[in-house]
Image (tube, grey):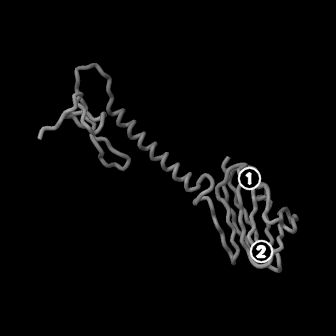
Amino acid sequence: MAEDKHPLGLNDRSVFVYRHKNLTPVWTICGVMKEEVERIQTSLQIDEDIDLHMKSWRVQRVGWGHMVSFLLLAILGLFGNGLLSERTLGKGGTFLTYDRFTRFENDTEMEIEAQSVNGKISVVLPPDFCERFKVEKINPDPSVQKGDNGSTVYEFQASGRAHLTLFLSPRSHGSLRCRVAVNEAEFEIVNFIYP
């Protein structure tokens, strides 16, 4: 059966695919040949650089791949709240949850779930943590707040298990690695604050 030809010599797959005997393959990002671009010889004086077009198509496909990857990482939480950002640490029945990736001057939370010892729970924030984060609010309010060798100590009256939430605001950007103590159990916090 004879194939219907487009009046301009184009097939129905794409306006960029020409009919001619001199074929050049177009490759996708995966390296699989998708379609072919035909080179045509005409008597018209048209500057046409098919190789440049094919290179730009490859660059566009790589660019689209990078944009899709960037969006997926953002959705998963690499740049703020999400699955990649939230981290929960546990030790001896005490759990500490925080965001590994935060933004400068954008509020974040640290949640602590712990068993009281002698009717109280103590949280010790080291000096480098207090330099990087401002504690905006604590829920519930601590019964005692004091300084100890540059660290800030919060004590809470509790019976049994208790859930504490510290509302924090980053003061500067960059990476932070420090240890936070809850009832003598130490947790290593690794955090990156975006500008």
* Residue at left offset 76%, top offset 50%: 171
Label 1 sits on what residue type? Pro
Number of marks present in the image shown: 2
Q: Quadrant of residue 94?
A: bottom right
The one of 6 and 177 positioned closer to us in this rendering: 6
The mark that comes first in sequence, 1 or 2, is 1
Q: Residue at x 81, y 71 (%)?
A: 122
Labelled pair 1, 2 in contact (Cβ < 8 Å): no
Please tell me the numbered disc located at residue 184: 2
**Circle 1 Cα neighbour tier, 10 Å, few/some/many (<14 / 14–19 / ≥20):** many
Quarter assignment of residue 18: top left
Looking at the image, residue 35 lies above or below residue 6: below
Relative side of 69 to 121, left or right:
left
Counting from the top left corner in percent of width and height, residue 136 is at: 79, 56
From what the image shows, is residue 140 above or below residue 58? below
Q: Residues within 10 Å of mark 2 (few under 14, many from 20)?
A: few
In this rendering, the answer to whether 117 lies above or below 180 is below
The kind of secondary structure element at disc 1 is: strand
The residue indicated by pointer 1 is 170
Looking at the rendered image, the disc whose residue lies closer to the viewer, 1 or 2, is: 1
Which residue is drawn at the image coordinates 26% and 20% (left, top)?
Answer: 44
